[in-house]
Amino acid sequence: MSVLSTLRELDHGQRHTVLASFLGWTLDAFDYFLLTFVIVGVANEFGVEKTDVTLALLLTLAARPFGALLFGRLADRYGRRPILMLDVVLFSVFELATAFSTSLTMLLVLRFLFGIAMGGEWGIGASLAMEAIPPKARGIVSGLLQSGYPCGFFLGALANWLLIDHIGWRGLFVVGTAPALLVLYIRRKVPESPVWQQQRQAPRQGLREAMRGHWKLALYLMLLMTAFNMFSHGSQDLYHTFEEVDLHLPTGSAAAFVLVALLNIGALVGGLLFGALSERIGRRRAIVIAALLAIPVIPLWMYGGTLVLYGVGAFLIQVMVQGAWGVVPSHLNELSPGHVRGTLPGFAYQTGNLLAAVTATAQAWIARAHGGDYAFAMSVWIGVVALVLALLAWLGPEARGVGFGGMPD
């Protein structure tokens, strides 16, 4: 079943829900990745090392579990839709405030606050979409939703390429307030989750009571998402720095933009491909295959030798990285108990971000220890993490096609 045929089978409200969830994650990623394109510029303006600026990425990722827990619990209590709108407004406000940073310290604080707001979006958006659609559509819609992340990365690269020489890094963060407009669309077009509406009549449970008997699952999901986040952030966050330092491509150059564009096209293809494939072969098997296929692509990705081969490598590595990720929204929501579906998937995801938050800084340290060789640092990182991710996915549980609430499977 193709993406278009799947979307055609959805009703009017379901399509709007899927689109809003996709746009939410796209614009969230757009705001996050803007900083990755201006690390060198920020470091030069504030007179600090590039590794000091990467602490902003670490703090953003580290803050996201707090947002996932806060906004997730609010979404389980008050509904997915209103809390998603609140969340989008907040991360847009903190994105705008970043543009007016007067020091690195101020920027770090604002990116931490941005991370709290960002942390709530994925879990709420994914649960809203997954609870609205038929089980047979979850794999394809899962890949579509997760493809919002590379789409956001692509939009960030496009904005950087077109605007950086005209408005500077501060102007890019002003442009990053655009996601706030999504709230108007959600308010007008997106209905509340039918599963949440069914469950709202049930007695309210505290987090500890709702999670009784599920703590081992929660711990496993956190470990799995740690590996997932090390996989994605390890292949993306310092890629533009690799272009500037190892490939000597200026930040606003067409060549640098094309490589990032190919990287994100590969991510889009991979998310849709493996998301759909997971409906046929299972969630775990799709993740394992994608993770292991990333390993033989590493030499082409980091040591291609020509821009054409670097482009092919960038495309293929993200087919595999985001291919594995394309399974995540459906996999986590299917494994989560209904009363905490607004909280657990997002919290596990963002706790994985917390544990993986050191990725960019660790890669920068490894590169510095090897003469500034970012290719070496990123290659070793991705090779090891791919093996760990495949092992964790293979050893874990699966609940493909499980019914949500009173909805049939």
Image (spheres, rainbow, N blue to C red):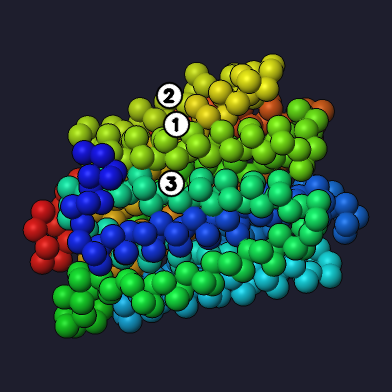
Whether residue 69 is visible to the viewer of this picture, yes or no, is yes
Q: Give the tally of numbered discs.
A: 3
Per the image, the residue denoted by label 1 is 320
Residue at coordinates 38% horizontally, 77% vertically from top-left? 187
Q: What is the distance, in whole Å, between disc 2 and disc 1 at their CAs?
A: 6 Å
Secondary element at tag 1: helix
Q: Amino acid at mark 3?
A: Ser
User: Sequence order check: which comes first, mark 2 or mark 1?
Assistant: 2
Per the image, the residue denoted by label 2 is 293
Residue situated in front as seen by the camera: 120 or 173 = 173
Per the image, the residue denoted by label 3 is 147
User: Sequence order check: which comes first, mark 3 or mark 1?
Assistant: 3
Whether residue 76 is visible to the viewer of this picture, yes or no, is no
Residue situated in front as seen by the camera: 264 or 300 = 264
Residue at coordinates 31% horizontally, 77% vertically from top-left? 79
User: Sequence order check: which comes first, mark 3 or mark 2?
Assistant: 3
Q: Amino acid at mark 1?
A: Met
